[in-house]
Image (tube, rainbow, N blue to C red):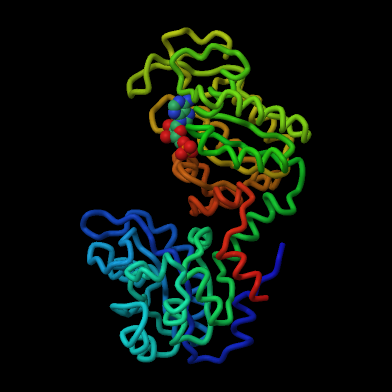
C-alpha cells in the first residue's frame, strides 16, 4: 500500500498544546427531535480523538452535514451532533459557530490542552464544495497540522478533504488507516482465491464496478435484481422480474470480458419467485429456466446459496457489495442472511478475510446478524463504491502526497 503519515508520526512531529484539525464524517442520520439514529460513524472517530486528546493537542473537528449548498442553514447545524459526540467520548466538547475566521480561531485557542471543539458545517461556505483555495487556507489558518479521518468523504475533492492539504502537514487518522488497510487486504494485495459478491438492484449503477472487479478477482458472484439482467442476457425467461432490457448487450460484454480475464462469473441456478414485491407473499423456489410469465424473482434459491457458500469455503478473501435478494421483506431475505452468516462463520474461524460496504450492504449484513463478524464493514457509501470501481479518491491521494 502507498504511504501516509500516521498519528504516531504526528505525535513525534508536533508538541502538546498545538492546534490540530481533524476531518471527520459527522454526517449521521438524525431523528426529528435531533437525536442521532445511528452513531456508528461517531464511534469510529473515538480512537483518533482520544489519541489526539491524550497527546495534549487542542482539537478542532471539521465536517460537512447535509446539503446546505454553500449557505448557513440552522436545520443543518452540527451543534446536535457535537452534543452526541461529547456523550460518546465522555468529555466536554465546545462548538464554534463558524469553521473559519474569528469564531473558529477563538474557540480553538480557548481550548484547554486535550480539549475538543466541533466547528460548524463546512458546507455553509460555497468554497467547501468548490475546493476553493482561499477558503481552504482560511480553514487551515488556526492549525499546525491536519488529520483526515473521513474515508467516507474522501471521494470528493473539497476544501476540507483536499484543498486544505496544500496548507498544512497532513496525517492519516486511525479510522481512515483501518479502512485503507482493510481495503488493501481485500483488493490491493489480497490472499487468493479472491471472490467478490455483487448484488443489489441494477446493473446500470454498478457497471464500472463489475468491470474493475472482474479484472481483479478470481470469482464474481452476481446476485440480487442485477442477476436477472444477466439471466435474461443468457436467454432465460424471467417473467415479471426486475430487469434492465437496455443492458442485455452490456451484461453479455461483462461476461465475455470476465471470461477473457480468467474470472469465473457465478449466476444463481435457482430462484425464489412470487407474484409481487410485497409483504405477506410466500416464495416458491424454481430453477432459473422455469420462471412463469406472471412471477418475479425476489431472492436466490437454496441451490444458489449452497453454491455461494461452497465458493466462500474455497476462498481466502471476500469482497461483498449488495444484497442477494429483496432482503427488506421476508422471506426474501433468506439467501442474503444465509450467505452472510456463512461468511461471518468462516471469518470467525480465521479462514476468510471478509470486507463489505456500499449502499444497502451494511443494513443487509446487520439484518442477517453477521456484520459484527466480518473482518471489516465500511460505513462509506459512495467512497467505497468508487474504490471498488478502481478510482483514485482525492482525499486518499492527498494523504499519499504528503508522505
Ligand atoms: P443496491 O442499492 O443497488 O445495492 O440495491 C439494493 C436493493 O436491491 C434492495 O433494496 C433490494 O430490495 C433490491 N433487490 C435485490 N434483489 C432484488 C430482486 N430480485 N428484485 C427486486 N429488487 C431486488
Q: Reply above or below: 372 against 118.
A: above
Residue shown at 69% from the left, 44% from the top: 317
Question: Does 301 sit above or below residue 389?
Answer: above
| Residue 230: x %, y % from top left | 59, 24
Q: Quadrant of the C terminus?
A: bottom right
Count of numbered circles in the view? 0
Between 291 and 351, the one lying in front of the other is: 291
One can see residue 402 in this view: yes
x%, y% of residue 355?
A: 61, 48
Residue 400 x, y percent position in the rendering: 65, 69
**In the rendered image of this protein, does residue 35 appear above or below residue 371?**
below
Which one is in front, 379 or 236? 236
Left or right, 382 with reference to 94 = right
Name the residue located 47 percent from the left edge and 12 percent from the top edge.
239
User: With respect to residue 191, does 305 lie above or below?
Assistant: above
Which residue does the image show at 45% across and 8% down from the upper left?
A: 293
x, y percentage for residue 224? 52, 29
402 sits left or right of 189 in the view: left
Residue 368 in view of the camera: no
Q: Residue at x 48, y 61 (%)?
A: 153
Name the quadrant of the N terminus.
Answer: bottom right
* Quarter where residue 269 is shown: top right
Amino acid at each position: 500500500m502507498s504511504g501516509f503519515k500516521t498519528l504516531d508520526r504526528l505525535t513525534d512531529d508536533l508538541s502538546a498544546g498545538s492546534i490540530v484539525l481533524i476531518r471527520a464524517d459527522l454526517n449521521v442520520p438524525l431523528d426529528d427531535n435531533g437525536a442521532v439514529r445511528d452513531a456508528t460513524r461517531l464511534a469510529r472517530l473515538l480512537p483518533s480523538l482520544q489519541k489526539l486528546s491524550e497527546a495534549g493537542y487542542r482539537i478542532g473537528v471539521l465536517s460537512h452535514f447535509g446539503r446546505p449548498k454553500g449557505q448557513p442553514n440552522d436545520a443543518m447545524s452540527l451543534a446536535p451532533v457535537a452534543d452526541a459526540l461529547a456523550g460518546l467520548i465522555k468529555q466536554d466538547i465546545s462548538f464554534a459557530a463558524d469553521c473559519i475566521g474569528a469564531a473558529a480561531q477563538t474557540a480553538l485557542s480557548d481550548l484547554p490542552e486535550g480539549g475538543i471543539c466541533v466547528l460548524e458545517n463546512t458546507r455553509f461556505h460555497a468554497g467547501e464544495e468548490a475546493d476553493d483555495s482561499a477558503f481552504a487556507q482560511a480553514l487551515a489558518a488556526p492549525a499546525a497540522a491536519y488529520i483526515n479521518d473521513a474515508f467516507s468523504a474522501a471521494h470528493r475533492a473539497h476544501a476540507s478533504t483536499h484543498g486544505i492539504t496544500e496548507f498544512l502537514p497532513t496525517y492519516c487518522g486511525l479510522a481512515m488507516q483501518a479502512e485503507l488497510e482493510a481495503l488493501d487486504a481485500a483488493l490491493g494485495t489480497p490472499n487468493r482465491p479472491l471472490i467478490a459478491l455483487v448484488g443489489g438492484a441494477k446493473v446500470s449503477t454498478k457497471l464500472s464496478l463489475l468491470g474493475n472487479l472482474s479484472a481483479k478477482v478470481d470469482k464474481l458472484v452476481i446476485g440480487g435484481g442485477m442477476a436477472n439482467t444477466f439471466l435474461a442476457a443468457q436467454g432465460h425467461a424471467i417473467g415479471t422480474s426486475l430487469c434492465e432490457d437496455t443492458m442485455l448487450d452490456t451484461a453479455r460484454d461483462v461476461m465475455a470480458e470476465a471470461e477473457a480475464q480468467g474470472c469465473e462469473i457465478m449466476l444463481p441456478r435457482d430462484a425464489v419467485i412470487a407474484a409481487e414485491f410485497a409483504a405477506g407473499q410466500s416464495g416458491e423456489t424454481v430453477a432459473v429456466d422455469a420462471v412463469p410469465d406472471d412471477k418475479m424473482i425476489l431472492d436466490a434459491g437454496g441451490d444458489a446459496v449452497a453454491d455461494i457458500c461452497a465458493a466462500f469455503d474455497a476462498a481466502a478473501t471476500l469482497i461483498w457489495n449488495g444484497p442477494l435478494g429483496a432482503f427488506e421483506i421476508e422471506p426474501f431475505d433468506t439467501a442474503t442472511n444465509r450467505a452472510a452468516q456463512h461468511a461471518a462463520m468462516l471469518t470467525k474461524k480465521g479462514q476468510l478475510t471478509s470486507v463489505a460496504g456500499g449502499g444497502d450492504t451494511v443494513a443487509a449484513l446487520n439484518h442477517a446478524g453477521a456484520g459484527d463478524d466480518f473482518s471489516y464493514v465500511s460505513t462509506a457509501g459512495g467512497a467505497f463504491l468508487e474504490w471498488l470501481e478502481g478510482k483514485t479518491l482525492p482525499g486518499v491521494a492527498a494523504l499519499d502526497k504528503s508522505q
